[in-house]
Amino acid sequence: MRNIKRKTGMAAAIFGISALVLTACGAAPEAAPSGSAAPTSGASAPAGAADFTGCIVSDAGGFDDRSFNQSSYEGLMAAKTELGINVKQAESKAATDFAPNLNAMIKGGCDITVTIGFLLSDDTKKAATANPDKHFAIVDDNAIDLKNVKPIIYDTAQAAFLAGYLAAGMTETGKVATYGGINIPTVSIFMDGYADGVAYYNEKKSKDVKVLGWDTAKQTGTFTGDFDDQGKGKNTTVTFANEGADVIMPVAGPVGLGTMDAVKELNAGGKAVKVIWVDADGFESLASGNEFVLSSVVKEMGKSVQDVVTADVNGKFDSTPYVGTLENEGVSLAPFHDFDSKVPAELKSELETLKADIIAGTVKVESPSSPKTK
């Protein structure tokens, strides 16, 4: 395959558990339900695990966002089950909760505190600077250069590139779409990869599939302005559908749930619109509308959080960024689930070949928002 090298996106994504018992914002940290769990892996718990406390602070989307907050939380809970550590958490409802929740974790004796999302970067840096003896990890941010902060970041453009190629291969209208919550690097990296994947499909197939919602050259597109208002997600989706898009990828956390509401109504009204979810496998994490999820651009946040916490318990914490890629399975394109029989065998084969070529470097997927390691 011929190389494609695109400079895209100045920005990229921030982008179940049905009932979590969560702390009030800024309050003293609450232990996770059921206390300290005994290890279940069959292996002995590391020395000192029972005295280790791992903590987590969500962004404003909350731990039940069926997206990156939930996946990260599940990673910490997996570490609890595997190792027998103690766990505390604080759920943020707004940006003003970030600092109080971080302070509550520190006062609560947390050995490592995981913060979720680019928007917590400033408050995480302040807390880590003020508490050099404490360990921190931040999901979706690589801007903090401190020895006690572990960045957990993902080259989601790689998996989104596959999603864009898939969308282009599955559209019946010749138009696909994407939109974001806020134009920040962890959002637009998805949009960059998605648009470039469509462009690559067009190049290989001599097609002209259009992408609504993102212009890689101008680095501008459609954003709802937050990660909370599901009504905006619904309205944006209806607008895209009315313009002819039949595969839509929201990169907006809980706002994307509005897309699911819209897609259910659109399909009931006779418009065959499909969704590509992000962060988690939407078919598995969404409470309803799963049948309209074509695939998902997955960041394996649960596994990476679990791995980072486990390393700290074992005395192997360091500040070298963890970077999830297709090669190390830190990012992936989810299975097609209900659409599996509808995705042509030829397209499936092309996606497997494209994945291998991206891993091998034969196809270059690059964005200004792709992770830069120190």
Image (cartoon, grey):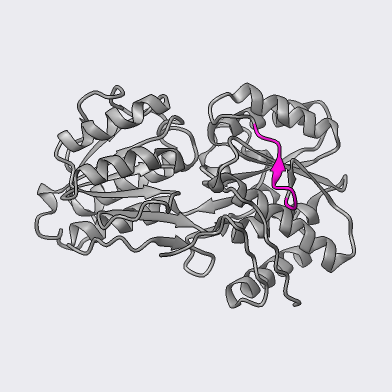
Rendering quarter of residue 35:
top left
Question: Residue 221 in the image: x percent, y percent?
Answer: 71, 40
Q: In which quarter of the image is the N terminus?
A: bottom right
- The residue drawn where x is 51% and y is 43% is 14
Rendering quarter of residue 46:
bottom left
- The residue drawn where x is 87% and y is 48% is 174
Q: In this view, does 147 lie above or below 18?
A: below
- The residue drawn where x is 83% and y is 68% is 204
Q: Quadrant of the C terminus?
A: bottom left
Q: Is residue 173 above or below residue 7?
A: above
Q: Is residue 38 left or right of residue 69?
A: left
Q: How many marks?
A: 0
Question: Residue 109 in the image: x percent, y percent?
Answer: 14, 39
Question: Residue 31 in the image: x percent, y percent?
Answer: 20, 33
Q: In this view, does 193 lie to the left or right of 95?
A: right
Q: Is residue 170 above or below residue 101?
A: below
> Mostly what secondary structure, the magenta segment?
loop
Toward the viewer: 196 or 267? 196
Rendering quarter of residue 114:
top left
Q: In this view, does 25 lie to the left or right of 111?
A: right
Q: Is 225 contained in the magenta span?
A: no
Q: What stretch is highlighted in magenta?
A: 216-223
Q: In this view, does 161 lie to the left or right of 323?
A: right
Is residue 23 visible in the rendered image? The answer is yes
